[in-house]
Image (spheres, helix red, strand yellow):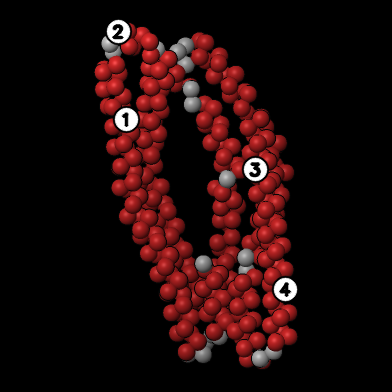
Amino acid sequence: IKFLSQFRPVFIYAGVFSFAINLALLVPSLYMLQVFDRVLTSRSNETLVLLSLAAAGALFIMFLLDTTRSRLLRGAGMLLDKLFGTKVLSVLLDLTAQSSGSANAHGLKDAATLRNFMSGNSIISLLDAPWLPFYILLIFVFHPLLGIVATCGAGALLLLTWLNEKLTRKSIESMQESSRVASRYIDISMRNAEVVRAMGMRPAIVAQWKKLNDKVVQSQLDSNEAAGWLVGLGKFFRQFIQIAMLGTGAYLVIDQNATPGVMMASTIILG
């Protein structure tokens, strides 16, 4: 609750910036629509120049807003690190004093992961994702058939994303846990390197680490194997959806149910 109350203004401003940025992302589509349906038919250089200047100005504003949003979130990430970093370290020191504490050695890394999430691309994607229905609705306005194609394509990609999360989550968690165990084992061994060498335990230490590391590698292979074909399938679907949208738009243009500008604009919006 304290975290949300302190960072609420950051999320509000980031949401407002995301609203403006996603509206600006429509500029290339609208520009294409006007060029195909107005400029090419009227052959007006003045209209082309005016549209180009307006589009360039809108995109420059989008650039400024996007840069400001990124700086805002990076600043929030640094503030979060200052807010939780010292507290996490204090708790870890207390736990380490009470027990072996080795299981808690990665607490600061977890705090760093949260900081990187706040200042990275993941949260930006999270802010932009809710605009998907708006874009699809806009394509429906152009033509219902184009909207159906867009909905099917977006649904297929969302399904692939869900499957990727479902199939790889356990293996990734297993790999991370195995990696932590191996890392803790090495840390302990290095701290007692003189004892290990004096007692001739180096071969046993190396053999034990190899077992732990083999488990990490196997978990990583399982994760990559589960996700590999889904990644390839996702690339296929993204390209196929673009082709399907262009083909559907061309069909509508041939039957005079849409204009070439609508065909190109819908494809760009879907992208």
Cα distance between the residues tagged 4 and 2: 76 Å
Q: Residue 213 carries which label?
A: 1
Total number of numbered discs in the rendering: 4
Label 1 secondary element: helix
Q: Which of marks 2 and 3 is in front?
A: 2
| Residue visible at 66% across and 92% down in the picture | 42
Direction from residue 240 to residue 94 in the image, left or right: right
Disc 4 vs disc 2: Cβ atoms closer than 8 Å?
no
In front here: 205 or 132? 205
| Amino acid at pointer 4 | Ala
Q: Which of marks 3 and 1 is nearer the N terminus?
A: 3
Quadrant assignment, res 20: bottom right
Disc 4 vs disc 3: Cβ atoms closer than 8 Å?
no
Cα distance between the residues tagged 2 and 1: 23 Å
Is there any visible trace of residue 134 in the rendered image? Answer: yes
Q: Mark 3 points at which residue?
A: 74
Q: Which of marks 2 and 3 is nearer the N terminus?
A: 3
Q: Callout 2 environment at 10 Å: few (<14), some (14 to 19), or many (20+)?
A: few
Label 2 secondary element: loop
Q: Mark 4 points at which residue?
A: 54
| Residue visible at 41% across and 57% down in the picture | 159
Disc 2 vs disc 1: Cβ atoms closer than 8 Å?
no
| Amino acid at pointer 1 | Asn
| Residue visible at 56% across and 52% down in the picture | 125
Is residue 78 placed above or below 95 in the rendered structure? below
In front here: 146 or 227? 227
Q: Earlier in the sequence, mark 1 or mark 4?
A: 4
Q: Name the residue under label 2.
A: 199
- Please state the horizontal and vertical placement of residue 143, each as a whole percent of the image: 53, 79
Disc 1 vs disc 4: Cβ atoms closer than 8 Å?
no
